[in-house]
Image: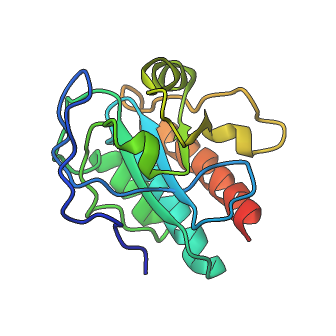
Amino acid sequence: MLQPRWPNHVPQRLQPGDDARDHRPLARCGLSVSARPAILFVCLGNICRSPMAEGAFRAAVQAAGIAVDMDSAGIENWYIGKPPDPRADATARDHGVDISGLRARQLNKHDFTGFTHILALDLEALRHLRQIAPGATTAQIALLLDMVPGREGRGIADPYFGDEEGFIDTWRDVTMAADALVARFS
């Protein structure tokens, strides 16, 4: 079972806002990992792409029987405490994955030392992560699709302003990345 490492941890403020949800570490992407991996998936608001990535990865690691901690967060504080977008939830559910219990939170400074890998869903999030990462960062920061051969350097489009097809495309991308990540940790 994937459990939070610090269930009672209350993070400190990291610009541009506070984190309303307990910190839960995630695994790193890409490098060999000696300690238990802890991966954080990061997008803009933490209601579409990053919860879908967390759900797809959770399903993949459970199927593979490997131990990895994971969470998701957003750059912005717009949706703190809110569930995933109903379209993201429905798309995941259509693929047998329940993300309805996830709640949006904002990235915080503890994420940079509590996770082994922080995976951005797009180039904007990657730039932001690299810009605000403290000097004591222990996490490897990369694009999620860097884990997928042939997709390196590409972001996953934000489906928020689109239609159902955009969410299906996002699911396909995060599932492909989840499978590639599991292969790295197996």
Q: Tell me if residue 48 can be seen.
A: no
Q: In which quarter of the image is residue 67?
A: bottom right
Res 139 visible: yes
Q: Where in the figure is residue 39, as x and y percent of width and height?
A: 52, 53
Q: Nearer the viewer, residue 15 or 160?
A: 15
Q: Is residue 69 above or below residue 114?
A: below
* Location of residue 170 in the rendering, given as x and y in whole percent from the top left corner: 54, 42
Q: Which of the two residues, 18 or 173, is positioned nearer the viewer here?
A: 18
Point out residue 92 in the picture as x, y percentages from the top left corner. Answer: 44, 59
Quadrant, the C terminus: bottom right
Q: Is residue 140 above or below residue 69?
A: above
Q: Where is residue 118 in the image (x, y as percent from the top left)?
A: 52, 42
- The residue lying furthest to the right in this view is 150
Instruction: Give left or right: position of 137 versus 111.
Output: right
Q: In the figure, 1 relative to 130: above or below?
A: below
Numbered-mark total:
0
In the image, taking residue 16 as reference, residue 48 lies left or right, namely right
Seen at 43% across and 81% down, the residue is 1
Q: Residue furthest front?
A: 136
Front residue of 125 and 27:
27
* Residue displayed at 25% across by 64% down: 101
Name the one closer to the observer, 111 or 81. 111
> Does 114 sit left or right of 28 as displayed?
left
Residue at position x 24%, y 66% in the image: 7
